[in-house]
Amino acid sequence: MIIRLLVIFLLLGLPVQSQILSERERAEKTDEILADKFENLLPQLMDRAGIDMWVIISREYNEDPVLRTMLPGTWLNARRRTILVFHRDRERDTLERIAVARYNIGKNIISAWDPEEEPDQWKALIDIIEERTPATIGLNYSKDFALADGLVKTDHDEFLAMLPAAYKDKIVSAEELAVGWIETRSQKEMELYESLVAQTHAIIAEAFSNKVITPGVTTSEDVVWWMRQKVTELGLETWFHPTVDIQRKDEALKDHIEAFSAGYGETVIQPGDLLHCDFGITYLRLNTDCQQHAYVLKPGELTAPAYLREALEKGNRLQDILTTNFQKGRTGNEILAVSLTEAKDEGLRPSIYTHPLGLYGHSAGPTIGMWDSQGGVPGTGDYPLYPNTVYAIELNTTVEIPEWEKDIRIMLEEAGFYGEDGFKYVNGRQQELYCISSK
């Protein structure tokens, strides 16, 4: 399938990288997105979680993962000890955004602490709490979600030591609120996400072409480092090191651990190889995660063999089965179980390990299987599916190839959005193999 935005860019004669904002524009866009989410999203999430005061405490270079996503575009880290307080008054329909810090947190969160008047930062925080008498105080601690477990022991202990006894029984885990903040995408974010995934697809398309690969000469490691370098030259970042692996007729299929740990290194790419990559980039605090395949044509071939094209179709069918089962309120484990059952009933040999995607690559939300937990994932797999969330639709199906006298594995991963109207891919998906000439 040809990616829509990539086609548009090419028809207009514009390089995809021309869509990348300058650093100044990125900071402005980041702050614009945050202002919108603080005003329009956070009140809803606090109401859903039943929390009327959310206290987030961090120190410089040891930031709570949630707080990191709330910093303005010109802040790369917290400063000294940074404390954020969000107070929701449902009766008045207001949300106060307060910083107990020496500085305003950009334009979105204003400092309410005057160190000259009250030198003790903890005491200033307690004064804010007592003035508002919250019924619940959410803190970021969680057994199941690392991204919602950002309150470190020192800050936790010092805060509780200062907190009056009357408020200690009002402390609750802010897990649901923290996960909701991290997983929920705003309309402004989704307007950016399609171009980000298109950029990811464009880099893969170039990597899996004769611009980069000369069969018989180029190694899989050469392609890996070309992808890393391409991202750097575009002024972007990767959130994990890419991989490029090879399946071929005369070599046994590697298992997941062997392929991931050993990789393919300096293996020379040859005609007849089935290539696969795992690649993702970070831009404007959003992340992509994509796996696609390419075939290296043998001399005289004009397209990939029918048996490989049919294998890819089976991978696409598994995607369809999974995403059709996305229903609001279903847990990740429920989606996993019904999808695996349906796929096996159709004769597929599936493995599903789909994860939330967004502000983090392996983000917070419902885990839909792990490659080594196909029976369900306790904790994160028990979390329900909510609308306006993005997922890396990551899975594979094993396919017997009689022509190769072996099995191969079709491994696919694409960004998908689940909204009020159901599921859709953020920027399409691979339905045709890339073909690389051996001429």
Image: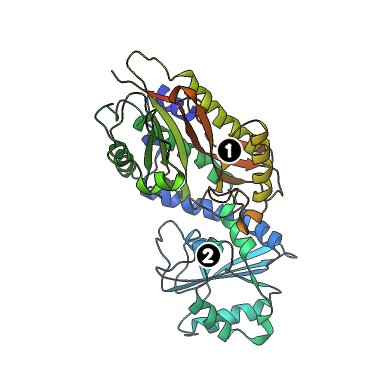
Query: Mark on residue 20?
Result: none
**Total numbered labels:** 2
Q: Provide the residue designation for mark 2.
A: 109
Q: Position of residue 120 (x, y in %)?
A: 49, 85
N-terminal of the pair, mark 2 or mark 1, is: 2
Q: Is residue 221 above or below residue 70?
A: above
Q: Position of residue 279 (x, y in %)?
A: 41, 41
Q: Is residue 28 above or below residue 62?
A: above
- Which three-letter amino acid code belongs to the residue tagged 2? Ile
Residue situated furthest top in the rendering: 300
Specify few, some or many for label 1: CA neighbours under 10 Å numbering under 14, 14-19, or 20 or more: many
In this rendering, does residue 277 appear at all?
yes
Q: Quadrant of residue 174?
A: bottom right
- Which three-letter amino acid code belongs to the residue tagged 1? Pro
- Please report the residue visible at 46 percent of the width from the left and 39 percent of the height from the top: 290
Q: Provide the residue designation for mark 1.
A: 350
Q: Position of residue 287 (x, y in %)?
A: 47, 47
Give the Cα separation between the discs numbered 2 and 1: 47 Å
Residue situated furthest right in the rendering: 91
**4 or 431: nearer the eye?**
431
* Left or right: 31 as drawn, with respect to 240: right
- Please report the residue visible at 58 percent of the width from the left and 38 percent of the height from the top: 350
